[in-house]
Image (cartoon, rainbow, N blue to C red):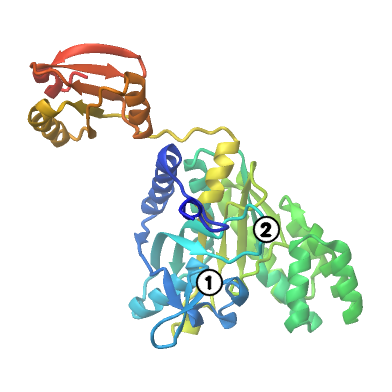
Amino acid sequence: MKKDLLHTPEGVRDIYNGECAAKMVLQDRLHDVCRLYGYNDIQTPTLEFFDVFNKERGSVPSNEMFKLFDRYGNTLVLRPDMTPSIVRAAAKYYEEHVLPVKLCYVGNTFINVSKYYQGKLKENTTLGAELIGDNSIEADLEIISMVIDCMKNAGLKEFQVEVGNVAFFNGLLSKAGITGDEAEELVSLIQEKNYFGVEELLLSLNIDKDIAEVLLELPQMFGSVDVLYKAKDLTTDNKECIDAVDRLLKLYELLKINGYDKYVSFDLGELSNHAYYTGIIFHAYTFGTGEPVAGGGRYDKLIGQFGVEKASIGFSITVDTLMAAIKRQNIEIPVDISGALVVYSENNFLKALKFTNELRKNDTNICMIKYNALKNDEQYAEYARNSNLANIIFAVNDTENVDLYNIKANTKTSVSIENLLGGKF
């Protein structure tokens, strides 16, 4: 029974030692990008009322949420999606702001995925940003540029951001009169690039032939900017579709300014299970994972459901998925390895405590541990490596000298405490 308690539930995992240190470094790198663009941190609670994520909001399906009840009978959920949480907070605290609000966050989300999604985590760390109160093409550019900078700052050399515009698809649906369950099913089939499934559904709906042909093309309408010109040719009489494509073309021209166009491709079949997206939508892909490492888009009507009308756009990065991709690409995340493990004897504790306090004042990482004669140098070295420490200071003998062991060089030298405090190690 006690051994059973050592295991985690399905879909969640422990992260420790070097992996945890690397993840913290990666999060700092991503957060640095948000800071450089002038975004301010916000934290929202892990627990939210169910209604924040209900079907009207267009978030995660109800059967994929972890639900519980408080003492008053209210239905609560572990947040499955950060965007509605941030939007709720923005509607509450920034309602009167007339200038755009720029917020960034890092937090865990929880999705009760099916057991058939083997290997897919139910708890993920997500980091992202939301730009609230700006409906401009410049806002679209900023968010896409931030995603690209995040991928570069993470150490990725090869990645692609696939950009679409939900408004193009919505324009086709409106013209065809497709709504409700049929629209949801069509979204799912197009996301899967299921050409035959799309064809079968459209035949059953008996819609206008010209619109059906464009919808049939959607699963294959991805690639270079040429895809956008093709889309315009197919929808010359549909203003909503033309406007959607023109916005993507303008975005492409702006991305050329800093050379970020090379990281972008277009996919007019780029849709999302999150129904709150209204315009630009995107996902970032790289090698080593079958899922996008980042995603986002424009959601101009979501915050209005919380009583405040503000156009908005944002992105989120699934840090765990990005970590897996980085590992499979053999990209090293440099973790700071410095400081020392101080191994002291019981008789030398006070002396060791005195000089370790001085070292910490100089911002030197110090971990203290009592000497055990049954342990050898390599076992202490392994302990230090797991703690990202570069040296071991053996303060075992009652002298004014200590043994300084450099783990990487595998050398041990005797140094005076005076020189040690002078930073000569």
Does residue 175 appear to the left or right of 393 in the view shown?
right
In the image, residue 1 above or below residue 213: above
**At 22% from the left edge and 19% from the top edge, which residue is drawn?**
425
Q: Secondary structure at mark 1?
A: loop
- Of 209 and 323, the residue lying toward us: 323
Q: Secondary structure at mark 2?
A: loop
Q: Which residue is mark 2?
A: 117
Q: How many marks?
A: 2
- Across and down, in percent, residue 186 comes to 78, 72
Does residue 250 appear to the left or right of 236 in the view shown?
left
In the image, residue 408 above or below residue 144: above
Q: Is residue 178 visible?
A: yes
- Across and down, in percent, residue 161 comes to 62, 51
Amino acid type of the residue tagged 1 in the rendering: Phe
What separation in Å lies between label 2 and label 1 (alpha carbons)?
16 Å
> Which residue appears farthest toward the front when viewing the image?
1
- Across and down, in percent, residue 393 comes to 22, 23
> Which residue appears farthest toward the bottom when viewing the image?
72
**At 13% from the left edge and 17% from the top edge, which residue is drawn?**
397
In the image, residue 121 above or below residue 43: above
**At 79% from the left edge and 70% from the top edge, which residue is drawn?**
235
In the image, residue 180 above or below residue 292: below
Q: Is residue 207 visible?
A: no
- Across and down, in percent, residue 10 comes to 57, 58
Q: Residues within 10 Å of mark 1 (few under 14, many from 20)?
A: some
Q: Which mark is residue 66?
A: 1
Decide which of tag 2 and tag 1 comes sooner along the chain.
1
Amino acid type of the residue tagged 2 in the rendering: Tyr
- Give the image quarter of residue 407: top left
